[in-house]
Image (cartoon, rainbow, N blue to C red):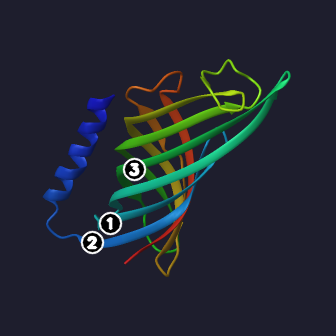
Amino acid sequence: MKRSICFLMAVVILGLAAQSAVSAKMGLRGGLGTDISGGLALGVNGSYHIDMGFYTTELGVSLYHANNAYDSTSGAHTYTETTGLTILGGLVNLLVNYRPNNPFFVAGSGLGMINLTWKETSATDTSLGTLLPGGGSEQSTDALVAGSVLNLGFGYLFDNGLDLRFEAPIILVFSAPGNAAAVVPTFTLTGGMAF
């Protein structure tokens, strides 16, 4: 899988180098993201667009961050679970039919780094791990992992250069910490401009 993604990225980059007459633009976008657990993340993206005729190649860097907290009760104990997630990724997207006043299709791949901080605390349950002053306990995990990204989506490019997109980046974590999932489906809704 890693070799396939690297091969796809190499083909796209070599294709870019082989083009003799292309027009290029810079792009900025922002938006919201989520995963299947429903936590929200905010993100920004900077990109470089290369128009190659029927499709546009987009080389981009994205940064997403989320802080989410959930409260739950199990028997006589209450728990608070907090998760902080920061994702920094580089992505090569092909934007097919990326023309003003048209819907377009997005397909891409890339690599990313994921910084995860997770903590579960309870004021009454002493079985979680580290005992807290005043009662209760907590357990936590901090991890920095790498992963690859496969991206599919669609969007609409308006006449003024604004585009809106719905994308489904799937993160494949190389060595997931603890019991964390190695495949993380996510969804993003973004808006951006190329200039």
Q: Secondary structure at mark 3?
A: strand
| Residue 136 relative to residue 194: left or right | right
Kindly give the residue lying farthest to the right in the view shown: 76
Q: Which residue is nearer to you in this view: 135 or 108?
A: 135
Residue type pointed to by label 2: Ala
Disc on the earlier residue, 3 or 1 = 1
Tell me which residue sits at (46%, 38%) in the image: 171
Disc on the earlier residue, 3 or 2 = 2
Q: Quadrant of the N terminus?
A: top left
**Which x, y percent locates residue 138?**
63, 29
Q: Which residue is nearer to you in this view: 75 or 42?
A: 75
Residue under label 1, please give it.
Answer: 49
Residue type pointed to by label 1: His
**Which x, y percent locates residue 153?**
51, 51
Q: Are marks 3 and 2 in contact (CB under 8 Å)?
A: no
Disc on the earlier residue, 2 or 1 = 2
Tell me which residue sits at (14%, 57%) in the image: 18
Q: Secondary structure at mark 2?
A: strand
Distance in Å between CA atoms under marks 2 and 1: 5 Å
Kindly give the residue lying farthest to the top in the view shown: 127
Quarter residue 149 falls in: top left
Q: Are marks 2 and 1 in contact (CB under 8 Å)?
A: yes
Residue type pointed to by label 3: Leu
Q: Is residue 100 above or below residue 177?
A: below
Distance in Å between CA atoms under marks 3 and 2: 24 Å
Residue under label 3, please give it.
Answer: 88
Residue under label 2, please give it.
Answer: 24
Q: Is residue 145 above or below residue 157?
A: above
Distance in Å between CA atoms under marks 3 and 1: 19 Å
